[in-house]
Image (cartoon, grey):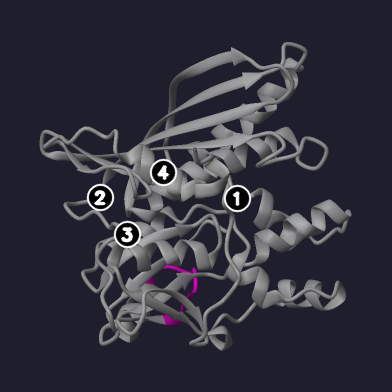
Amino acid sequence: MKTIGEIGEFGLIDRIARFGAPSADVLTGIGDDCAVLRLGDRKLLVTTDMAVEGVHFRRDLATPYDIGYKSAAGALSDIAAMGGTPLFFLVSLSCPVDTEIAYIEAMYQGITNLTSAYGVSLVGGDTTRAHDRITLDVQMIGEAKGLHVLRRKGAQAGDLLAITNTVGQSAAGLKASMEGHEVPELLTAHYRPIPRITEGQWLAAHDAVHAMIDISDGLIQDSGHLARINQIGINIETDKLNPSPALSKYCWENNLNPIELMLSGGEDFELAFAVDAQECQSLFSLFKQEIRTPLRVIGRFTHEWTGVRVDGQPTNLHGFDHFSV
């Protein structure tokens, strides 16, 4: 009998998806950043994001405020990936009985300071005892902005692969944190990422953008989800990745490869999207007039193969899988 370690996280998700009951009101179920549910003439977006001590965070490295902030950022990023507007959220908490109340309050302060910036209200949750570690589960409820919901499915061969801002800084920030290195820009990228709500809404409102996903498990892995669901391939061009100055400097000083961190490092919470090649330049120009976040093309979708290649070649790099062994 197979174990979860043998089939991996996404094999497990595929197995679980079989239990999803079909419904005319479920427009998108398991397999995207959010479920899309019909409620009258509205389209609700529902997602959940769990943070487990020892897996997603370490109390000796992160402050309770940062733990809460980042937990909320992950759930908000799922809404951003669908081009939606976040509305309400719930938080479920599991913790040992000897956890200091001030510690829990600081986590919730981190959560609500971020969510309040987007006008999102805490409306409930659940609490339970744990033996030895803290777990936070943030469930976010949002709504499609306008009639269009941007999903993972929709990319076409010939589309360009683009991302918001840059990637790799969070992974470098984690390494810096574990080594005790003071690199503010990288530490901020890891512990206080910015969910791209406004950027996602803007991109979803334009028909030239065909599909989108947030980068939580690594660029190769998450772009691979776009390739798989659309049954096409992606070629990522490393000369277009353009690491940030902070990432380049830190990697040079610590004998690290910035391109590897950009390809396989996770928790950037940037957006990766498929855009029509013919309309890309004009779309980027319009975007630049309204939003300061940079956009960059880093690859192209193709029908020549399925899956992800780097500079036209297969790669052994991959992103984060919770159950890989």
Classify mark 4: helix, strand or loop: helix
Marker disc for residue 145:
2
Residue in the picture at 74% in, 77% down? 248
Residue 159 on image: x %, y %: 30, 80
Q: Earlier in the sequence, mark 2 or mark 3?
A: 2
Quick one: label 3, few (<14), some, or many (20+) residues within 10 Å?
many
Which residue is at the front of the view, 272 or 314? Answer: 314
Q: Which amino acid type is shown beneath numbered disc 2?
A: Lys
Q: Which residue is mark 4?
A: 13
| Number of residues whose C-alpha sits closer than 10 Å to that of mark 1, classed few (under 14), some (14–19) or many (20 or more) | few
Please state if 288 lies on the left or on the right of 142 as rendered: right
Mark closer to the observer (1, 2):
1
Pointer 4 or 1: first along the chain:
4
- Splitting the image into 4 quarters, where does residue 249 fall? bottom right
- Magenta extent: 290-299
Callout 1 secondary element: loop
